Image (tube, rainbow, N blue to C red):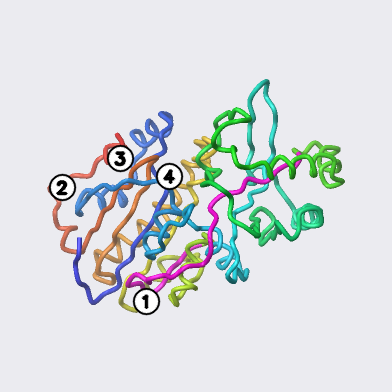
Amino acid sequence: MDVKLRAMHCRLLIPDLFPPDPAFAEHLGERRFPHLEKLIARGRRGCDAWQSVEQWLLEAFSVARQQDWPSAPFALLGDGGTPGEDFWLHAEPVHLRADRDRLVIADSTLLDISMEEAQALAQSVNSHFEPDLHLEPARANRWYARLSAPPGQPTVPLSAILGRSLEPGSAAIGWHAIMNEIQMLLHEHAVNEAREARGAPAINGVWLWGGGRLAEIKAPPLRAVLSQHPLALGLASHAGVRGSYPPEDVARWLERGEPEGVHLVVLDALSVPARHRDLERWSLEVQALERRWLAPLFEALQRGRIGMVSMHLGSESQVLNTETTRSDLRHFWQLRKALGHYCCAA
């Protein structure tokens, strides 16, 4: 898949287009998305293994795995922080609830955290644990932890265990004795007393994962990275590639005549509803992708305003890679099929 073009090449990374839940697969078989389906059907296709959006992005920028895939320091950079040479982890605020002999976890997207709450909780944790651990809330629902020394074993991303009940002694939380200490510290915090009084779930823990230090990076041949994902923006910044949020009006962005070269666009709006098995919201987000991105890109490709659209469409364990040029669109005999047909894991 190496086609040299003088025109703009738009490269889309779309995680969670093919979630494993059967209800999502059934939906993809019933609904039709003509522009997305044509781009897949008429281009070249291949599948690769997929673990996470973080691993995909780090590998795209040639960042080597450390003990974990070191997403935290680069994401902190994308969130406007200064990682320096320290060891950083994602420290996702969570609600932990004991259910008989298991733990049930709700992540920050369900907690409606204010920045004032985040800062107050972080201040209490820092007063108790520094200098061994320092929490830094870059956003109300995105926190990072600086550790004086790396943990003794790899961590597990929160996305890998959400929706599953965990035994308290499971490998996923085996090294996290510090998480238990944080949970006890936050249990009767004034912020949580106020939240519980108004019927909101307590922010009674953090999930630590994705640790590492800033490392050498090799920028792929990109003109720009467009994303709201902090890791994508942090990697772009560290590599000296222009990074920005995606445009609100894609058609106008294309009409402006972006310069030639590869523009990587990370569109991860499907991840939260897929993670929480929210079929209605996920369906609306897929429709929005078709309307806001795939339709104008297809039309721009058809008119020769851009030279190629390539896509990386994630499922639970594999990613469908496609690339489509203007000449490919003439292959009318390659009939489009419902999206569920193209899932690598199907």
What secondary structure is found at the residue carrying circle 3? loop
Q: Which residue is mark 4?
A: 16
- Return the residue at label 1: 258
According to the picture, the residue beneath numbered tag 2 turns out to be: 334
The type of residue carrying mark 2 is Gln
Sequence-wise first label, 4 or 1: 4
Mark 2 element type: loop
In-front residue for pair 100/231: 100
At mark 1, the secondary structure is loop
**Residue indicated by mark 3:** 343
Classify 10 Å Cα crowding around label 2: few (below 14), some (14-19), many (20 and above): some
Disc 3 from disc 1: Cα separation: 31 Å
Q: Residue type at mark 4?
A: Asp
Tell me which segment is drawn in magenta. 202-227
Amino acid carrying label 3: it is Cys
- Mark 1: which amino acid? Glu
Quadrant in which the N terminus appears:
bottom left
Percent position of residue 265, x then y:
41, 63
* Percent coordinates x, y for residue 324 in the rendering: 23, 59
Q: Is residue 248 magenta?
A: no
Vertical comparison of 234 with 128: above or below: below
